[in-house]
Image (tube, coloured by chain):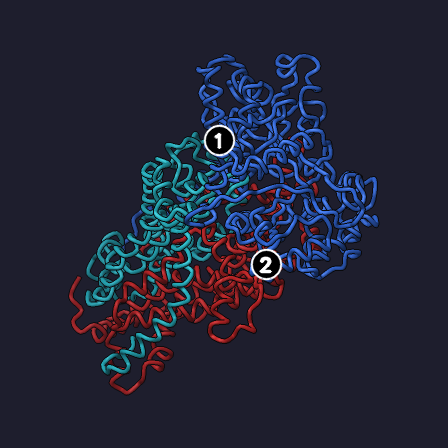
Chain colours: A red, B cyan, C blue
Amino acid sequence: MSSAGTGTTVSRTRQSETAAGHLGPKGRRRGPRRPPGLPWILPAFVFVVGLIYYCIGYTGYISTLNWDGVSPNPKHVGFANYTQAFHDPVFWDTIRHTVIFFIVTFTVQTALGFTFAALLHSKVKLPNLYKVIIFIPVVLAPATMAPIFRQIFSANGQFNAILSDIGLGSLAHPWLAQSSTALPVIMAITVWEWTGVTFILYFAAMTQIDKEILEAARIDGANGVKVLTRIVWPNVRGTTIALAMLSVIGALKTFDVPYLVSLGGPNYATEFLGTLIYRVSIPQAEVGYGAALSILLLILSLVGALAFGLRGTRRN
Amino acid sequence: MFETRRLSSKVILQVILTIMVLPFLFPLIAMVQESLSGQGWGNYKAVWATGVVPRFFLNSTIIALGVIIIVYCLTMLAAFGFSKLHVRWKEVFFWMMLAALTMPEVVLLTPLFSTAVHLGLYNTYASVMLPLAALQIPFAVLLTRNFVNSIPDELFDAARVDGANAALIFWKIIVPLTRPIAAAIIILTLIAAWNDYLLPLVFLQTPSTQTITLLPSFFVSEFSDDQTKVVASAVITAIPEVIAYLCLQRLFERGLTAGALK
Amino acid sequence: MRKSPNAGRRRRVIPAISVLGFLVLLLTACAGGSSPGGSKGSATSANLTWWGWTPSVQVAQQYIKAFNRKYPDIHITYKMLTIAGYNAALRPALASTVGPDVFDVAPGGANGSVETYGPDAVDLTSAVQKALGSDWKSKLSPIGVSSMILNGKLVGLSVGAVYSGTVWINKNLFDQYHLTPPTTLEQWASDCATFKAHNVGCFVQGVGQTAFNEDTLQAISDNVKPGVWAKAIQGQVPWTDPTIVKALTIWKQMFTDGIMEKGALGVQQYPDANNDFLSGKYAMVMMGTWYMQNTTTAGMSAGISGAGVSSPKNFTAIPILFPDVAGTGTTGALYGDSDYGIAVNTKSSHQAAAVTFATWLGTSTAGQQQVADALDDIAALKGVQPNWPTISLVQSGAQQPVLSKLISGAVTSDEPRLATVSPDLQLAIGSATTTVASGSATPAQAAAALQAAAAKLPNHGAVG
């Protein structure tokens, strides 16, 4: 591969050379010029689809049964499980919670992860220490942290103690005992747990930004915030879209934190589809209903992810 | 990212960073305190005294390595294919893979179990490695594809004009340039595999194959729950992951110089 | 770019192969529905696997060691699963050919439900007849037997039972503040006020974990009018019965009178409430006979240091009767079920040896003495009391008489606790307790909602 000299200039020349006769109607290169990609994606595709799609098919079949998962004679009920879901007020609670959860956690995690990544790409002291602190929550099993968080947010726990220390004692609540405040706690714990992931992905994406562009902007007099919003943020758009898609799916599937910390309570205030599916499938042994909910989860996830994914590809 | 030539901006950045990081630190301190309460270091001694820690560590490592290798190889190939090569119905393939990500693990247990038994894989590492890898790949492909998208097309055209075939392009361009995202997906895959609890619980029968996530169960019984030792187990479990993260940090930095390859 | 001549053909072949591969996987997974039944094997020599969520690993090893003194050639590997993971792991295992030989079952709708897994278990009636004779039913505690029978089949042999209805107090704290254990609602509230004035917690309950709320509600209901609760479960009496509504009203009063701790809805019984009591932060907790393990010096120290206290100082934990909160004078109701039983997998290839183990643990004096001495469960075999001289209690003078009385009283009780409650009904009862506790429903409304939910369930939500 020949050296490209001073990067941008030469590549622009190359682009105009090849652009002339071979741009398709959408401005993209047409197929035959690119090597076939099918053999490259097939291993992953067959592996994933082969292993998981049987399970999806199985779940779809089970969703038409009224079954406890063990007895040899399940009853076929067609779509009754789905209508049961639509009439189940707890199901709609979970949808509502998921929407709120997704909006809040995605926004906060993105803001925090992006800011941390930007800050840690600058010359600060002890960067590895900060990186480790942000990252350790990702690594810890939620099962271990759940009792600790219950203790922290209990009526006489550390969080209320800190509030009264800084003079906000009147805001002290038994956070997890009230339907109104339990969901924000679950969201806070989730943000604590997952910001590390947003951080490392933005950090990785920022490594691709050309340093010269940043320098040029600084020379032109742009301050830090402007550089961040005008150059860095648009440049990591792909990561943001990917994170949005993953967050939608994650929000719908979320199980560990709401189940282990508050058991979906109090009174279903922190119930999510993930916890509902678990409760219905395992302790209540209504495997058919659980399967129907899982299929609904799959459909909602795809719709949500598509909503973000298509927005991303349209701009491309 | 931020300009840090003046001392005042250096200080401001450091202060902002520290304040932002404090809420992340407090629960970690609470956790370490909990692991040292009661019997203090005796908790760690008690965890070690179960005698299973080295074996469980080994099993978790084997499984994690297996999953990482499968995920890394298949993801890199697929991301390259999705991003830079021609595939008819590319998006259909992609979204079909993404759909696999949406299944909660608890729902997958029974069908995966019957598959594992019929393939004779029950109580083997493969019965845990394969599903874990299959669940991680869509997520990794999504991220890597996006990263590879940002590598300018001109690089590939230049290479093809010079006569390189797809395999050579993959090896000489993709693999080196994707180090930052590779580091990210390796770490995230490692965490998913290392921390997975449900699959090893169901598929690994004998103690000689069980993983580190089963360690806390030694201290929890029907009517007693020794949290101090459970948290000590969690700390022990977390240490290798943090070490791996620190080691992979260098790969993130390498990415910065990779741009010069142009 | 040159296209190889086979490229077009390859393009069609590859998707075909992948579809084929997928179908092969699908077919191998679908094929082979029914597996062959197990075989008997030798009754005295085998390698067995035992899955359970209880007892703890240490206690199980004790049982196995004692078992091996009589049957040295039967080697047992105990796999302890968590309570939360038990059903999830057991269901696919029993459906396969590689499940455990011996597994825990329990009455009611929670873990290892007798009703759910009964079909996978061997009928142990002939084995127990051989061990105890034809009048075996009279030799075992009634609760343990009736809850293990499904459609005439003895699904498991109960190892021991647990009973609820007691409240455990920290006697040292009561003595320190010159208080006596409460016997009425008013006294309970005033005791709590005194404790609070000295910055000591009074009564701790994990209201967020509804199974234990059911215990408390049953205690109150039995105090208001005995027998109504059991009838309501069977659907013979509606849940809107005045007794139940009164019970829910008193339940609510426990919150308004300051007996329940602040933020109780956000607390779980294990580990939170348990740790709070053992670390001396609270003076009372509602636990059942399983809490006897905290009366021994070793058990209490382990519990206290497990609760995070660095130099554990044992205190005297004593069970008291549930206070006469309704003022009716009828107290002392104890209700329980078999804690767990041992079932033998029909697909096991070592059925005879597995039956040997189940019979030993559930019916032999040697096995049952082990169970009684562990002080977790109350032995299923009648007449087996813990060997008190060998057990080191924290304060045996104060504790031993109370414990003996508790055990002998419990064994005569035939009121079920969770055995007859299906998981759906348990969920509905739990909802009633939490909606009343949070104030989002009045006792009358909660009772009506509970009745509506129960009416929709098969057999009113009762099982067995």
Q: Which amino acid, by three-letter code, is at mark 1?
A: Val
Subunit that carries the residue with mark 2: A
Q: Which mark is residue C59?
A: 1
SS class of the residue under badge 2? loop
In percent of width and height, residue C201 lies at 58, 56
> What is the x, y in percent for residue A211?
25, 74
Residue A196: horizontal and vertical position, in percent? 38, 61
Q: Residue at x 25, y 52 (%)?
A: B167
Q: Indicate left or right for A183 with B13 as reference.
A: right
Q: Compared to A248, does B65 lie above or below?
A: above
Q: Quadrant of the C terminus of chain B?
A: bottom left
Q: Quadrant of the N terminus of chain B?
A: bottom left
What secondary structure is found at the residue carrying circle 1? Answer: helix
Confirm whether residue A25 shows in the render.
no
The structure residue drawn at horizontal position 20% and vertical position 57%, both measured from the top left corner, is B163
Q: Tell me the kind of residue under disc 2.
A: Thr
Seen as rendered, the residue at the extreme bottom is A221
Gap in Å between the C-alphas at discs 2 and 1? 37 Å
Specify the subunit that label 1 lies on: C
x 43%, y 43%: residue: B216
How many C-alpha atoms fall within 10 Å of the one at disc 1: few (<14), some, or many (≥20)?
some
Q: How many marks?
A: 2
Q: Position of residue B140 (x, y in %)?
A: 38, 54
Q: Is residue C257 in sight in this rendering?
A: yes
Of residue C12 and residue C36, the one placed in the foreground of this image is: C36
Seen from the viewer's position, the closer of residues C294 and C94 is C294
Residue under label 2: A270
- Quarter holding residue C35: top right
